[in-house]
Amino acid sequence: MTNANSPLALVRSTIAEANDLLCSVNLLTWDARTQMPKAGAEARGKMLATLTRIVRHQLTSDEFAERLARAEEGAVGEVAAELAQIREGTDVLRRIPARLLSDIAELKARAGETWQAARRNNDFGSFAPDLERMVGLNRELAAAIGFDEHPYDALVGSYEPGMTSARLATLFEELRGGILPLLAAVKERGAEPDTSFLSQRDYPITSQLKAAEQFASLVGYDLERGRIDRSVHPFEISFTRDDVRITTRFNPNWMPMSLFGALHEAGHALYEQGVKPDYARTVFTTDLVGLYAVAGTSYGTHESQSRLWENLVGRDASFWRAHYSALQAIYPAQLEGIGIDKFVRAVNAVRPGFIRVEADELTYNLHIMLRVELEMALMDGSLAVTDIPEAWNEKTREYLGLEVPSNADGCLQDIHWSTGLIGAFSTYTIGNVMSVQWLEAAKRQDPNVAPALERGDVAPLRTWLQENVYQHGRRYSPDELLVRATGQSLTAAPYLDYLARKYRELYAI
Ligand code: ZN
């Protein structure tokens, strides 16, 4: 039993308080995106900033540093691992000047507005000055955090510990080598699946909500410890494992948006709901650098779970062979006369387009590579902000074979850069790649997983993920977690095999 006044107990109680405050930040964020009247935005921004500042102040105080140093003396095993993670996080936090963070926060508020107006008016020039300042502040941030080779490494490392621009460059090259020929073959085949029944029939919002709840529960999302709401941009957010909420958006003329959106967010939620109860209010459910209460160990690992449930399970023919009748029961008139094969082909249709959030599985990573390569060039100074539109359009031509019609549909389409998020895009592709590694490992290690999936039974897969991923929270780094469970660190080959198998079959190539 540790004494309540021992340095270890005091360190832990500070972390527990930080987690409580960051869970409150999450709750206020959830409210802002689902319930809050528009007029509340300014006051809400202040509340969020104050709470985050208090947490930051506590974690970077000299008093805390002293207690941490005393707690570290003689610590071994699990306690040493826990303290090492607190040390690592708070050391980074102490290196970032408070002035820099408030500059970024201030610019974020303004750049969000200028970006929206610029996109509306298709006027990149009016956003460029704010973006230039944002890039400058991010370069300062990278310098403060520290890096070995490339300033981008410091930024990506805060979302994906251990990831670097060099590792990404290798990964991207491998992915391009597999994806581009496959995409060319699909295009050449020219067999466009019919998707009109998904867009041209009326799918009432009430039925869409019912389907979202039913299918999110079916994969294991526990609605006793969660709820589904509606928001402009779908997201998952948690305030401890016992309250993990998701949102989805409903388009009456494109039913798959809410269905697969719900499966995606349910995948994130399974991770958060599955963390070991003992890890509540500890560093293993707290991102000390991002000042964010979260159980997932990195953005990419989190995304690997949402993509696994959305794409690998949710878009697979075997899943629908077992569950299509349940979907038809929700949409009896809309899906009348639509067979399973037709449905599966429609929800897996490949359509190269300009817009990332509408991209299919095959072209999605090309959108990400394009952005990440520009981010790296912005960070090392080899690309000027004013040259972004040209560079963007050129890469779109090269990767997707498309001519960008306007900057609004090109380099102005995403909110990320206006909010200062540089480095986060890569984690979407990392998640895609990782998702197949998990699934393959689960099938290899538990012979029940594959036959159960064939019958539409996801329980054995979920159990394996619970055991190997979810319960561990942030205890291991993404690389450690992957190697422990699958025997390999991040590798493109299984993902490329999966894509080739899937699209060769769907498009009869
Ligand atoms: Zn996601």
Image (cartoon, grey):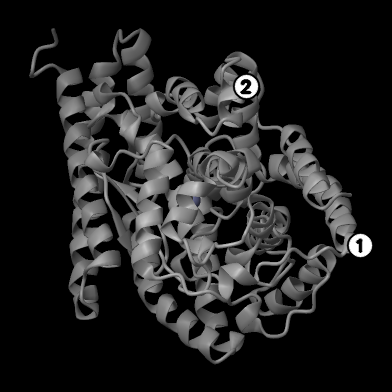
Q: Secondary structure at mark 2?
A: helix
> Residue visible at 78% across and 67% down?
395
Could you say which is closer to the camera, residue 358 or residue 317?
A: 317
Q: In the displayed structure, would residue 2 be above or below residue 239?
A: above
The alpha-carbon separation of the residues under discs 2 and 1 comes to 33 Å
Q: Secondary structure at mark 1?
A: helix
Going by the numbered disc 1, the residue's amino acid type is Glu
Kindly tell me whether residue 307 is visible in this rendering.
Answer: yes
Q: x%, y% of residue 94?
A: 35, 43
How many residues crowd around disc 2 within 10 Å: few (fewer than 14), some, or many (20 or more)? Answer: some
Q: Is residue 425 left or right of residue 329?
A: right
Going by the numbered disc 2, the residue's amino acid type is Lys
Could you say which is closer to the camera, residue 400 or residue 20?
A: 400
The image shows a total of numbered marks equal to 2
Mark 2 / mark 1, whichever is N-terminal = 1
Q: Badge 2 is on which residue? A: 443
Q: Is residue 481 left or right of residue 25?
A: right
> Residue visible at 67% across and 55% down?
348
Q: In the displayed structure, would residue 417 be above or below residue 293?
A: below
How many residues crowd around disc 1 within 10 Å: few (fewer than 14), some, or many (20 or more)? Answer: few
> Residue visible at 74% across and 66% down?
352
Q: Is residue 479 left or right of residue 465?
A: right
Furthest toward the bottom, the residue is 121
Q: x%, y% of residue 445?
A: 60, 14
Could you say which is closer to the camera, residue 32 or residue 209?
A: 209
Q: Is residue 344 left or right of residue 157?
A: right
Q: Which mark is residue 188?
A: 1
